[in-house]
Image: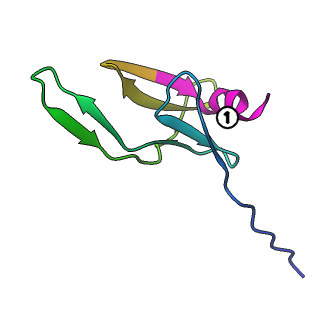
Amino acid sequence: MVNTVKEQEVWKQYPDCPFIEASNLGRVRTKDRTIMRKDGKKLFIKGRVLKQQRGKNGYMYVNFCANGKFINLYVHRIVAICFIP
């Protein structure tokens, strides 16, 4: 008999980037947000779960853009910062 207990997914905000959230199941997502373009127009960006990639060292990481800069962060570090007090 298989005991199937479904765990609830809890999302917490990443303190260094306010539009990034991590879950207790190891997923990372962005929130819906509106940004200002250089020409003064507002641009709506829909949030999504970020695709994880495996680095050469075996650790999973995610890529995203913040303030015009591309950022690579390890998933385990994001989750640890969000959930470990």
Find residue 7 and report its horizontal and vertical position in percent. Answer: 75, 62
Q: Is residue 15 left or right of residue 31?
A: right
In the image, what residue occupies the spot 44% across and 30% down?
63
Above or below, comparing residue 50 to residue 81 in the picture: below
**Dominant secondary structure, magenta:** helix
Place residue 69 in its image quadrant.
top left
6 or 20, nearer to the observer: 20
Residue 78 in the image: x percent, y percent? 63, 30
Residue 77 is covered by the magenta coloring: yes
Q: Position of residue 76 (x, y in %)?
A: 67, 32
Q: Is residue 38 above or below residue 22?
A: above
| Residue on which the image places disc 1 | 79
Residue in view at x 68 percent, y 32 percent? 82
Classify 10 Å Cα crowding around label 1: few (below 14), some (14-19), many (20 and above).
many
Q: Is residue 4 above or below residue 27?
A: below
Residue 30 within the magenta-colored segment of the rendering: no
Range of the magenta residues?
A: 72-85
Residues 38 and 69: in front is 38
Q: Indicate the secondary structure of the residue bearing disc 1.
A: helix
Q: Quadrant of residue 30?
A: top left
Q: Tell me the residue at 74%/35% (across/down).
A: 83
Q: Quadrant of the N terminus?
A: bottom right
- Can you name the residue that lies furthest to the bottom here? 1
Task: Residue at 52% x, 40% y: name it.
Answer: 52
Name the image quarter holding the C terminus.
top right
| Residue type (three-letter) at the residue carrying disc 1 | Val
Q: Residue furthest left?
A: 39
